[in-house]
Image (cartoon, rainbow, N blue to C red):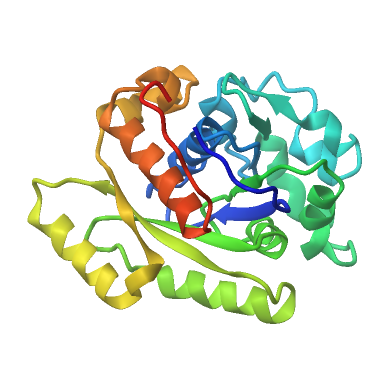
Amino acid sequence: MASSSSQKTKVICIANQKGGVGKTTTAVNLAAGLSLLKKSILLVDCDAQGNATSGLGFDHHELKKHLYHAIVGLADPVDVIRPTPMTNLFIIPSNTDLVGIEVDLARRKGRENVLRDLLASLRPFDYILLDCPPSLGLMTINALTASDSVIIPMQCEYYALEGLSQLVKTIRLVKHNFNPKLHIEGLLLTMYDYRIRLAYQVAREVRTHFRDLVYRTTIPRNIKLSESPSHGKPIFIYEPRSRGAESYLALATEFLRRRGVTVHISNGR
């Protein structure tokens, strides 16, 4: 289905401090789409709400080892990686224990580099995707410091650009202070409703401002996408023939092709 030359692991965080923009939906289903395209993927749930974790079928209340334990040194990072129902897709899960991470790391020297050091100790994957919390706190700073690039999901609504300037400012600060290679991978328009003129106007405005940074693929409003997390399944398992599945496979394909990776998609995937 996909082929390319070998490459070093690339780390990409999915970030937007504005909630409800499809961030976790994108993290889970982009990761799943890339795994369908024969890429080895590690998804790291950096959000204490654990939505990426439950979205892949794990009960975060029953987890004995997860991201928090790896960060504070109570578990080897390798031991918190879990396989998922998708071949080639693995996850480091999370739960509400992560709420206290800022207190735990407050006095640690180099606390912005903890996640980067943790990921560096793992075996190579093609891509590591980091699902960030809807805030610009220490976990998001850690994710940005650990990443090569950032994907920013944006809902197609009136306040789409609200808060984006603050996120871009934070990215620049992290780039200047901690991570010189950091850049914006792309902006993704989510929850697009073709029937609403406002959605078209917002999309046009975003594309005018950010041009080639905006993915050509847009993610539509889709009931199957909304339902799949409650079933603990990525869209490709829950409803593989839905518009949501088609859109996230298109995004995964565009993501790879932007990076110069040859992608071949068979009819049977």
- Position of residue 242 relative to residue 109, above or below, is above
Q: Is residue 264 left or right of residue 12?
A: left
* Residue located at (47% from left, 43% from top): 263
The quarter of the image holding the C terminus is top left
Q: Is residue 229 left or right of residue 162?
A: right
| Viewer can see residue 191 | yes
**Image quadrant assignment for residue 159:** bottom left
Q: Residue 116: horizontal and vertical position, in percent?
A: 78, 57
- Position of residue 176 relative to residue 149, above or below, is below
Q: Nearer the viewer, residue 188 or 63?
A: 188
* Residue located at (40% from left, 46% from top): 251
**Image quadrant assignment for residue 49:** top right
* Residue located at (74% from left, 74% from top): 178
| Viewer can see residue 136 | no
Q: Is residue 200 left or right of residue 24?
A: left
Q: Residue 121: horizontal and vertical position, in percent?
A: 87, 47
* Residue located at (32% from left, 34% from top): 246
